[in-house]
Image (cartoon, rainbow, N blue to C red):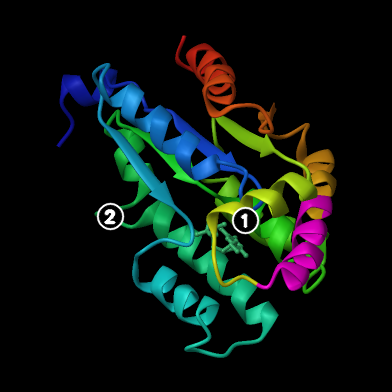
Amino acid sequence: MWNNQNLHMQRGKFIVFEGIDGSGKTTLSKMLAQELAQNGPRVHWTCEPTHNVIGKMIRSVLTHQLEMNEQSIAALYLADRMDHIQHPDYGMLHQLNAGDHVISDRYYLSSYAYHVPHVSLDWVVDANSIAANVLRPDVIFFIDIDVQTSMDRIARFRTGVDLFENEERITLVHANYQRAIEKIRHEENIVVIDGRKALDEVYAEVKRVADGVFK
Ligand code: TYD
């Protein structure tokens, strides 16, 4: 039932963080969520792939428990995203319409970066327009680091990774991000942040832009 409170309720803000491995997007997005939560409205930190039913299926593919071709995987990420947006209980739209803020670690820009060339950039952008038309971020932070910085950070913080295989993949994903950003920058509010500096400095930059979104 409608009530006056709902009519005047301001929709929450939807903020997305993107970047290659080691960019710091997860840490930065959690820092922002934590700081915003101190100022009043509820803040939901979330991520894609999700931890919901379809997201779990994707994680089984990522850990090689389930085998699937790349086009099906691309479609699965989209299905996970639509469920993430629209589910009546945990859906982001529902939370935003209730006035809560939502911060997501990855959204459709990740699909543009990770699924090409298994599918074309045009296809993946077109397919994801179903998500973009329902829920466009108020801002997408692209935390930009170069491939070498990514490799150095992975080598420092992770064990058991095949660095050679990683470098090839990270180089491709990095180039795909640049190409995708160029393609969609007129439709999206994308803010590129230099992620190579110290965490505090990078966060200060994120916070400065986020403050503008909340004005
Ligand atoms: P994530 O959990 O962010 O892992 P990491 O912190 O190691 O980057 O993402 C898991 C993987 O899913 C990552 O390799 C990127 C990939 N991915 C896609 O391929 N397409 C998508 O649409 C999304 C959201 C993620």
> Residue beneath label 1, please?
154
Closest to the camera, between mark 1 and mark 2, is 1
Q: Nearer the viewer, residue 189 or 38?
A: 38
Q: Amino acid at mark 1?
A: Ile
* Residue 88 marker: 2
Residue in view at x 65 percent, y 59 percent: 111
Which amino acid is tagged 2?
A: Pro
Q: Position of residue 142 (x, y in %)?
A: 66, 37
Q: Is residue 35 above or below residue 18?
A: above
Quarter of image, res 163: bottom right
Residue 177 coordinates in the image, percent (x, y): 76, 49
- Whether residue 164 appears in magenta in the rendering, the answer is yes
Give the extent of the magenta segment: 162-175
Please name the predominant secondary structure of the magenta segment in the image: helix
**Residue 171 visible at all:** yes
Q: Reply yes or no: does residue 144 show up in magenta.
A: no
* Residue at (37% x, 28% y) in the render: 12
Residue 137 sits above or below residue 110 on the image: above
Assign a secondary structure to mark 2: loop
Tell me which label, 1 or 2, sits earlier in the chain. Answer: 2
